[in-house]
Image: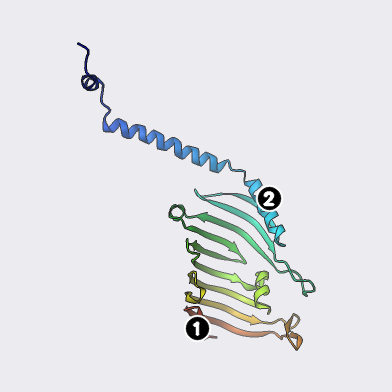
Amino acid sequence: MAPSLSSLRDQLPQPSVKSLLKWLGYLLFFMVCFVLFSYWTFPWDRARDQLVQEAGKRGYTLEIVDMGPSGLSGASLSGVRLVVPQKPGEPGPAPELIIDELSVRAGLFALMRGRKAFSFDAELAGGELEGAVDLGKEQELDFEAEFAELNLNQLGALRKFTFIPMRGTASGDIEIHMPAEAQESSGNIDVLIKDFTLGDGNAKVDIPGWGGLTLDEANAGDFNFEAEIDEGTMETVSYTH
């Protein structure tokens, strides 16, 4: 009589839990090696050139000396120079931002949940900057940054937003939560600027109806600014100098 399927199954050697874990470990090892090899051999030079081209299409001038991997999910850039475009007839040289070292990493667990999360850290303007950005499914934004010993005089791009020459060394932190409805935004700002100076006696601020106004240099000493953002409105908590 031919043996039954159940008897044949009983005669076959049964794999032990130890052997199963062993082969599972081999599989995971080769998967990790494959991912790391793909990541380390990524064409970073081509990615750098693509970033430069995309910035040029938007009117920016971008230079990157070197670009490569950072950790398991990020990129590291060195020798970054970004020139901000100016409007026709806008006086003065185009403002620029120079970053010695910049690392950007994607949050893998956040990506698995459908969110776009990134952390970053940089060395620039004689100081350090680090923070994180989290973009949710409903267009909400969480942003936080901490910085120390940033030389304002070396942040040329800052002039694009302040319109006034500034000098000093800034440290502090910023935390902002911006939901889909901007009027519901919240957050905190705490900034200390040592040896804060406004104006330089040469640069002019364009004031509608007045024309260019030259601001004499004014030293405000150490300046501390604290503010809270609640329901889309920023309220000053305190400022001292």
> What percent of the width, then of the height, locates residue 89?
80, 74
User: Which quadrant holds the C terminus?
Assistant: bottom right
Which residue carries the number 1 mark? Answer: 235
Quick one: 72 or 128, which is closer to the camera? 72
Bin the neighbour count of mark 2 within 10 Å (Cα to Cα): few under 14, some 14-19, many 20 and up. Answer: some
The answer to whether residue 1 is above or below residue 217 is above
- Which quarter of the image is occupied by the N terminus? top left
Question: Picture coordinates of residue 122 (x, y %)?
Answer: 57, 61
Relative to 177, say whether 78 is above or below.
above
Judge from the rendering whether residue 146 lies leftward or rightward of residue 164; answer left or right.
left
* Residue drawn 77% across the image and 74% down it: 90
Percent across and percent down for residue 197 are 64, 81
Dot 2: element: helix
Any mark on residue 79, and which? none
Which numbered disc, 2 or 1, marks the residue that appears first in the sequence?
2
What amino acid does circle 1 point to?
Glu
Name the amino acid, label 2.
Answer: Asp
Q: In the shown orientation, is residue 210 left or right of residue 47?
A: right
* Residue at the extreme top of the image, as rendered: 1
* Residue occupying image coordinates x 59% and y 43%: 42
User: Mark 2 — residue?
Assistant: 49
